[in-house]
Image (tube, helix red, strand yellow):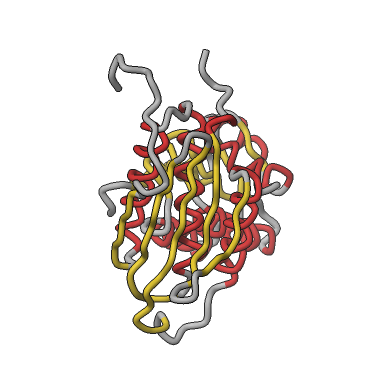
Amino acid sequence: MNDRLAISERREGVVPIVAVEGEIDIAVAPELRRHLEDLLDEGNSSIVVDLTGVSFLDSTALGVLISILKRCQASEGDLCLVAKDPQVLRVFEITGLTDVFSIVGSAAKAVELVSP
Amino acid sequence: VTENTECRRWSKEEAIRLSFPVQSDLMVLARITGATIAAAAGFGVDTVEDFRLAVEELCLLVQRHQEGTLHLAFLPSDEEIEVRCSLSPTEALGTESPEASDDMAYQFSQQILDSISDTWGEGGDGSESYMWFRMGAAQTVDEA
């Protein structure tokens, strides 16, 4: 557990929803990676990551999310992101990742997108 | 935030410097310092956010897989802020190969700087090499 990052998890049906709060930078990105990789190792192929509580993310966070997306897709699943903060969305837009990730405004919509 | 809305003006000689060990949990120092300087220079809220992201990405590009001490210099002028970042290395970081996501992150850092800074690059003065970016308050369009 890190003081600057809070990760919580719940399920909507079979889909795990990982809610992240705080700033995701090089210091805490490995913790997020471990959490998401554990979910994949448990057999989950689709994950929703809720970033609505995130106020900042950097390139290391993007690297983690991309690697998790690839693992999801390799298992014929998907990684869907929930984000509303303009600054957070801007980072995805700048890097062209809005074309790579499914990014929606609510967890319910995200679950709908990734549910089998 | 104070009621004094007049932008501070600095000369080039008034560089603000920050040095800290390459340690992931200290990167926040660079962001906080960058945001404070950008706000003091009169940058708007969104541009301050962009500036602190640019500072972070500059540091990430410079420190990549190395240990040592990062040196940041902020050089505000009337029109823009120039930021330089260099590293005094101690040794290569471990023996592990970089993960693929690290390479992606490196590319993302470059894309982010391409997009939100006015210009950025590498420089040197003979005794040290550094990476830098410049960003102006003119990008600010967010204030109502």
- Location of the C terminus of chain A by quadrant is top right
Left or right? Give the position of B20 relative to B114.
left
- Location of the N terminus of chain A by quadrant is bottom left
Left or right? Give the position of B72 relative to A71.
left
At 37% from the left and 56% from the top, the residue drawn is A28
At 37% from the left and 49% from the top, the residue drawn is B13
The spot of residue A73 in percent (x, y) is: 68, 58
Q: Residue furthest right?
A: A99
Q: Nearer the viewer, residue B9 or B66?
A: B9
The spot of residue B96 in percent (x, y) is: 47, 83
Q: Is residue B34 above or below residue B45?
A: below
Q: Nearer the viewer, residue B129 or B108?
A: B129
At 52% from the left and 44% from the top, the residue drawn is A49
The spot of residue B52 in percent (x, y) is: 44, 43
At 62% from the left and 33% from the top, the residue drawn is A104
Q: Nearer the viewer, residue A82 or B49?
A: B49
**Residue B128 visible in the picture:** yes
**Residue A116 visible in the picture:** no
Q: Is residue A9 above or below residue B1?
A: below
Q: Residue furthest bottom?
A: B95
Left or right? Give the position of A98 relative to A88.
right
